[in-house]
């Protein structure tokens, strides 16, 4: 069985500062993918970044980077230079063959960026 | 290139009624998944359609059923609506070939309220 844990219900960050959103996962599969999505109040789930279990380099996409620590089974999202528009819910998800590649989502972290 | 489109955006029903939600996948995608997202929760997988057949199903009762058409679009039907069915229903599309390392693309969702 796959499980995603996001332990931070809410996070606050000052505009232009960096913030780390935590995600730990559990799976018995050796091959899996980790995803982060952003969900604004409008409801749409916006894909941010992907990390494969065999990728040796941490994934980066613009201001987003994924701090992948395989031994710890963690996949934290780092947002650099936070902007007011980053205020949203953030979900970590995992896809693996053991789960028939159906993504399992965490409960999410609400991020609020202060001016 | 149109993304995932869902209709309607909002819907209000009463207990015991039936509802149909619709989804058109992103161009080039052949697989459609449906999720239920209750307030303050992450998306919960309902089922997935590929080649017009239900391929995977989450822990949802038979009141939830679906269909996929030859053009890959999909419908979600819910019968005998309960108050607990009130949620945001998200449709996600993907390519079966790239299901491990490519993200699902989500629509804006349908907000269903049961009175």
Image (cartoon, coloured by chain):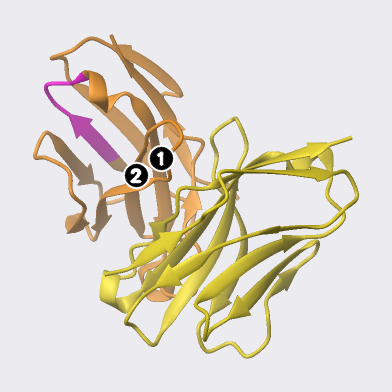
Chain colours: A yellow, B orange
Left or right, B66 with respect to B93, comes to left
Q: Which residue lies under the disc numbered 1? A: B90
Sequence-first disc among 1 and 2:
2
**Quadrant of the image for the N terminus of chain A?**
bottom left
Left or right, A31 with respect to B55, comes to right
Residue B72 visible in the snapshot: no
Could you say where residue B61 lies in the image, as x and y percent from the top left? 11, 40
Circle 2 chain: B
Could you say where residue B96 lies in the image, as x and y percent from the top left? 36, 69
Instruction: In this rendered view, identify the residue nearer to me: B33 or A84.
Output: A84
Could you say where residue A67 lies in the image, as x and y percent from the top left? 67, 74
Which residue is depicted at the point 36% across and 28% down? B87
Tag of residue B48: none
Q: Is residue B75 above or below residue A65?
A: above
Q: In what element is the residue under mark 1?
A: strand
Which residue is depicted at the point 83% across and 50% down? A82
Crowd band around label 2 with a 10 angstrom C-alpha radius: few (<14), some (14–19), many (20+): many
Start and end of the magenta stretch? Answer: B75-82
Q: Is residue A26 above or below residue A93?
A: below
Circle 1 chain: B
Q: Respond whether the residues carrying marks 1 and 2 are from the same subunit.
A: yes
Which residue is depicted at the point 37% across and 17% down? B11
Residue A18 belongs to magenta span = no
State the residue lying farthest toward the left: B62
Could you say where residue B69 lies in the image, as x and y percent from the top left? 25, 47
Q: In what element is the residue under mark 2?
A: strand
- Asked if the residue under mark 2 is in contact with the one under mark 1, i.e. CB atoms within 8 Å, the reply is yes
Left or right, B18 with respect to B1, comes to left
Q: Is residue B40 above or below residue B34?
A: above
Q: Which residue lies under the disc numbered 2? A: B35
Crowd band around label 1 with a 10 angstrom C-alpha radius: few (<14), some (14–19), many (20+): many
């Amino acid at each position: 069985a796959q499980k995603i844990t996001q332990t931070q219900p809410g996070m606050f960050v000052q505009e232009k500062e960096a913030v780390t959103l935590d995600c730990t996962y559990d799976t018995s599969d050796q091959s899996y993918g980790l995803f982060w999505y952003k969900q604004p109040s409008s409801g749409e789930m916006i894909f941010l970044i992907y990390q494969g279990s065999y990728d040796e380099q941490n994934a980066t996409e613009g201001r987003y980077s994924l701090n992948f620590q395989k031994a710890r089974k963690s996949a934290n999202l780092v947002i650099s230079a936070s902007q007011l528009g980053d205020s949203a819910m953030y979900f970590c998800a995992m896809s693996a063959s053991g789960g028939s590649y159906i993504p399992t989502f965490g409960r999410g972290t609400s991020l609020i960026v202060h001016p | 290139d149109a993304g995932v489109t869902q209709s309607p955006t909002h819907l209000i029903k009463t207990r015991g009624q039936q509802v149909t939600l619709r989804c058109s996948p992103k161009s080039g995608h052949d697989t459609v998944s449906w999720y239920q997202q209750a307030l303050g929760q992450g998306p919960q997988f309902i089922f997935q359609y590929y080649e017009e057949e239900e391929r995977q199903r989450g822990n949802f009762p038979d009141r939830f059923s679906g269909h996929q058409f030859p053009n890959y679009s999909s419908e979600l039907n819910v019968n005998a609506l309960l108050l607990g069915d009130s949620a945001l229903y998200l449709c996600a599309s993907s390519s079966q070939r790239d299901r491990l390392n490519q993200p699902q693309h989500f629509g804006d969702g349908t907000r269903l309220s049961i009175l």
